[in-house]
Amino acid sequence: MKDRHPRPSIAGPIILISFGVIFLLINLDVIELSAWDVIMRFWPILLIAIGLDKLIGRRSAWGAAIAVVMVLAILAGGIIFFDNQSQWTYASENFEIPLGNAEEATISLDPALGYLLVDALPMGSNVLLRGDVQPFSGEEIGKTIDFTGTQATIDLRTEGVIVAPLFGGWSNQPSWDLSLHPGVFTYLIVDLGVGKAELDLHDLQIGEMHVEQGIGQMIIMLPSTDNMDVNLEGGIGEIQVVIPEDVGARIRAGVGIGNVLVPSDYTRDGDFYVSPGYAAAVNHIEMDIDLGIGSVRVR
């Protein structure tokens, strides 16, 4: 009789072997990478392993062996290749959006991948948003800008078909470097596919913020703004949030696989972590964090 039991998936073992090899090489100083460089450069191995598993891995023992060898060969080639490869980027695109009469703004940022940095312009600036973007090959920056009275609506997004190296990295230099006017009350929306988002907002006026990221690291430094709503969503990676000392915070944080770290003086109230002196604080932040796999750290 034929064996009716399906072969177990080999995608999980392949992924563990692949990343185990990378971390071993890091520990032996063969390659110089941080843990997040590993995720940024080698995350496509997840897709390759799953695809090979479905295509040939479950058909036979030989198919499983071939799949393992193929993934490890691709991994080895990537490790050898990435140190000498070009940036695969176009020349920087610099732009400014004048302040005009804007007092409030809705700003949407939708880069497909890379390193997104957001910070504040000088208070006296006559610019609402200044950008320095280094697109990947094939990436175009789409812009939609609308001013209605004192309300501005800005949408910056990736367009086109990106041709980027499979094992490319962007941990050292922002590919989207944007600065916002600190005197404009802002509703901020960020949707980053794969990469690193560093949002230094402590000098900005943020009323509401929604950040969504597929894979990577999210670092957010919040301002001392009253009644701010923050919603953070991630697939795989790390979320770090820095809360000013004079702000009372109430946080609901859920992680599918991983952990949540909050300061030791926070108290638990049902599904929420509450900062000390929350009720008496002048400024308050309500935060909702959802992460599939990884870690959440609040400090």
Image (tube, grey):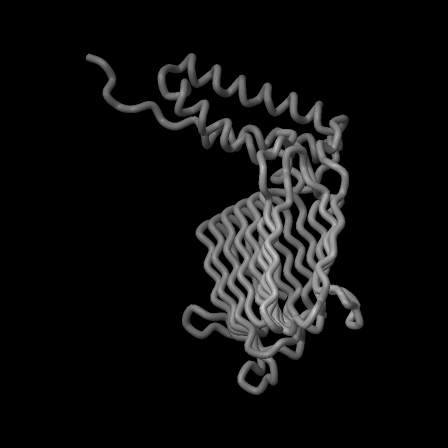
Name which residue lies at 63% across and 66% down: 299
Q: Residue furthest left?
A: 1
Q: Position of residue 69 (x, y in %)?
A: 53, 17
Is residue 215 visible in the rendered structure shown here? yes
Q: Is residue 211 left or right of residue 121?
A: left
Give residue 56's quadrant in the image: top left
Give residue 208's quadrant in the image: bottom right
Q: Position of residue 174 (x, y in %)?
A: 72, 47
Question: In the rendered view, would you say 38 is above or below 189?
Answer: above
Question: In the rendered view, would you say 99 is above or below 4?
Answer: below
Q: Residue furthest bottom?
A: 280
Is residue 275 visible in the rendered structure shown here? no
Give residue 161's quadrant in the image: top right
| 55 and 25: which is toward the camera | 55
Name which residue lies at 68% across and 69% down: 204
Name which residue lies at 67% across and 65% down: 201
Q: Is residue 84 left or right of residue 62?
A: right
Q: How many marks?
A: 0
Question: In the rendered view, would you say 212 is above or below 277?
Answer: above
Q: Position of residue 67 (x, y in %)?
A: 48, 19
| 246 and 132: which is toward the camera | 132
Q: Position of residue 35 (x, y in %)?
A: 65, 42
Name which residue lies at 64% across and 48% down: 196
Which image quarter is the N terminus in?
top left
